[in-house]
Image: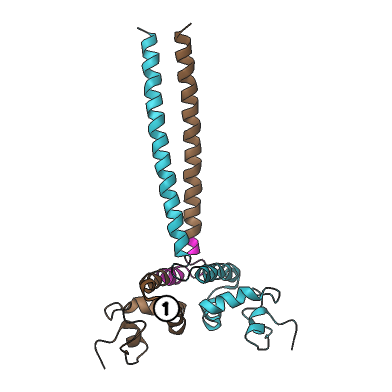
Chain colours: A cyan, B brown
Amino acid sequence: MNPKRCAACKYLRRRCPKDCVFSPYFPPNDPQKFACVHRIYGAGNVSKMLQQLPDQTRAEAVESLCFEAKCRVDDPVYGCVGIIHLLKTQIQKTQNELAKTQAEIAVAQTKLSQTQNSDFM
Amino acid sequence: MNPKRCAACKYLRRRCPKDCVFSPYFPPNDPQKFACVHRIYGAGNVSKMLQQLPDQTRAEAVESLCFEAKCRVDDPVYGCVGIIHLLKTQIQKTQNELAKTQAEIAVAQTKLSQTQNSDFM
């Protein structure tokens, strides 16, 4: 066995070809990274998706696929859509807090201008 | 051909079994829904993921899988991780606006208390 095989080829128990589509993104020292995308998408689908992309975008695509796959393993019902829901809730909460604070500032400014006006009476 | 086959069995050109794992979630009138998850995950992986889940969570799982698959088709590099980045940027923006507004209210309150204090002099 060639010890320089990438994590994907090692997992798939195959020879790692010179032009391996996985090799630049799945180093042999991180076997979990490939195991995770393989479990969710399957090696064939990942390979197909990468081959349809220009080289310079593949690293980012692998990272996002790995992130989504890890989310799906951790949360098989909602995957990373669960994170999207959480973030939307957090935005709503922060926007409510902002609206409340803006209302408070309006009240404070009204009080301030009333006090300033009374100075002239 | 049975016209009552679900969208998945229709797509896969197979008989739709009585206990079809796809049938409750992929009605024949929405063929794109299945085509999308099949393209990204493959029918076998979707079926495996659903079978590992209790019945009452499968509908939600299908919706989140369809959402993620649609995002990946629309944005092959970032998928729905692109949405997560956007939402995080939006949270940061709203939090900055909140901090700015809170600073404004602090200034207004200081001015107010200074004005009130000067009333007593």
Residue B96 versus residue B9 in the image, above or below: above
Q: Is residue B97 above or below residue B106?
A: below
The residue shown at (36%, 72%) is B56
Residue B80 part of the magenta-drawn span? yes
**Magenta residues, start to end:** B67-83
Residue B16 position in % (x across, y down): 32, 89
Residue at image coords 62%, 86%: A12
Q: Pinpoint residue A102: horizontal percent, then vertical percent.
A: 40, 34
Residue depicted at 39% across the width and 39% down the height: A99
Work out which quarter of the rendered image holds the N terminus of chain B and state it: bottom left
A82 or B31, nearer to the observer: A82
- Seen at 45% across and 19% down, the residue is B112
Dot 1 alpha-carbon crowd within 10 angstroms: few under 14, some 14 to 19, many 20 or more: many
x and y percentages locating residue B2 in the rendered image: 25, 91
Q: Nearer the viewer, residue B87 or A19?
A: B87
Circle 1 sits on which residue? B50
A48 relative position to B58: left or right: right
Magenta region, main secondary structure? helix
Q: Amino acid at mark 1?
A: Leu
Q: Secondary structure at mark 1?
A: helix
